Image: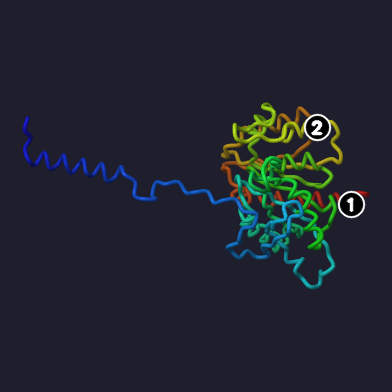
Amino acid sequence: MMYPNHILRASLAALVSVLLFSVPVQGQQQKKKRKPFQWVNELKQEIPGVKHATFRSPSMNVDVGYCIYLPPQYRNAENKTKRFPVVYYLHGGRPGSEIKSVKLAQYIDKQISAGKVDPMIYVFVNGGPVSHYNLPDRKHAMGADVFVKELIPHIDATYRTIADRKGRAIEGFSQGGRGTTRIMFKHPELFCSAAPGGAGQATEKRISENNGRESENLVFVPGDNTYDLARKYAKDPQPPLRILIHVGTKGFNYENNLDYMEFLKSLKIPFETLIVPDVPHSAQQIYQKEGLKLMQFHADNFRQAAQQKS
C-alpha cells in the first residue's frame, strides 16, 4: 500500500523525534559517581566559629579530618582558661564525611550568640567508610573506634573541653542516628546526653535478627546493633543515660522509630521524644523548627551532671 509523500514525511519526522529524545545526551542520564571515601575532606564554606582540622590516627597512621565549632565565649580572650562541654555530631550518609552536617553550625551559632542556650563546642565527626561502624575485616574501616578511642582523646587534649562524661554529649541523624544509638549504649560511661535522630532502626533490627548481616556484602560483628546493645545495656543501665529520640513525621524512618521506642519501653529504658510534625528525613529542617530544643536538652544535661557528685 502506497502512502502520500506528506504522510511519509510526517511519519519520518515523528520517528526521528522519538529517537532524538529517547537517546540520552552524553552524561545527562548517567548517575553521578559516588566520590571515593576520604578520611580528610576540605571545608568549602566559611561558617562562623567553624574550622576544619586533622589529627594523626594512631591505629591507621593516616590523617583524619573533623570540623569543630567553637562558640563566641570560647574565642573571647577573657575566657582563656574556661572549659566548655562538647557535643559530638555524627553525620548521615554512607559513607559521609566530617563536612556533611557542618551547616548545622550556622543555626547553633545563632542560638548561642543570641544567649538562648549555654555555650557548647560542637565536633562534626568523620564516621569512616561505613559510617560510624567498625569493620575489622577491612583496612582503615574502624569508624566507631577511631571516633571513641582516638578523636575524643584528641579533642580533649587540644581544646579547652570538660574532659569528662559530665561535659560530653553525642547526637546524630539518619546513619548518624544509628551510630549514636549504638555508641551511647556501648559507651554510656562517655556521655551524659544522647540524641539519636531519624535512625534506620528497621535495618538495625534486621542486622540483629540475621547474626550481623545487613546484606550479602555487608556483615557486621554479631551484637553490634541498636537492638542487641540496648538489651545488654538494659541489664545494667549504669551510668544512666539521658536520651532524646527525635524524628520528623514525614521522614521515611518515622514508623520504625516509633517501633524502636516501643522496644525501649519493653526494656524499661527511659527516654524522651521530640517528634516534629510535617518534617521529612532532614536534620536541617528539624533544626530549623526544633533545633533549640535539642540544644537545650544537652545544656540541661550538662548542668545536671555538673551538679552531681563524682
Mark before the other along the chain sequence, 1 or 2:
2
Residue at screen point 27% across, 46% down: 20
Residue 262, compared with residue 109, is above or below; it is: above
Of 297 and 71, nearer the camera is: 71
Assess whether mark 2 and mark 1 are in contact (beta carbons under 8 angstroms): no
Q: Nearer the viewer, residue 277 or 280?
A: 280
Amino acid type shown at disc 2? Lys
Does residue 269 lie above or below 46 as drawn? Answer: above
Q: What's the residue at 80%, 55% (across, down)?
A: 153
Q: Residue at x 60, y 50 (%)?
A: 37
Closer-to-camera residue (107/180): 180
Q: Quadrant of residue 112?
A: bottom right
Check disc 1 and report its element: helix, strand or loop: helix
Q: Position of residue 110 (x, y in %)?
A: 66, 61
Query: Is 161 on the left or on the right of 262, as rendered?
Result: right
Q: Which mark is residue 232?
A: 2
Of tags 1 and 2, the one toward the viewer is: 2
Residue placed most toward the observer, 114 or 154: 154
Q: Position of residue 158 (x, y in %)?
A: 79, 62
From the viewer's perspective, is 168 left or right of 309? left
CA–CA distance between discs 1 and 2?
28 Å
Circle 1 residues within 10 Å: few <14, some 14–19, many ≥20: few
Q: Position of residue 5 (x, y in %)?
A: 7, 41
At label 1, which amino acid type do we have? Answer: Gln
Find numbered disc 2 in the image and state the secondary structure of the residue it sits on. helix
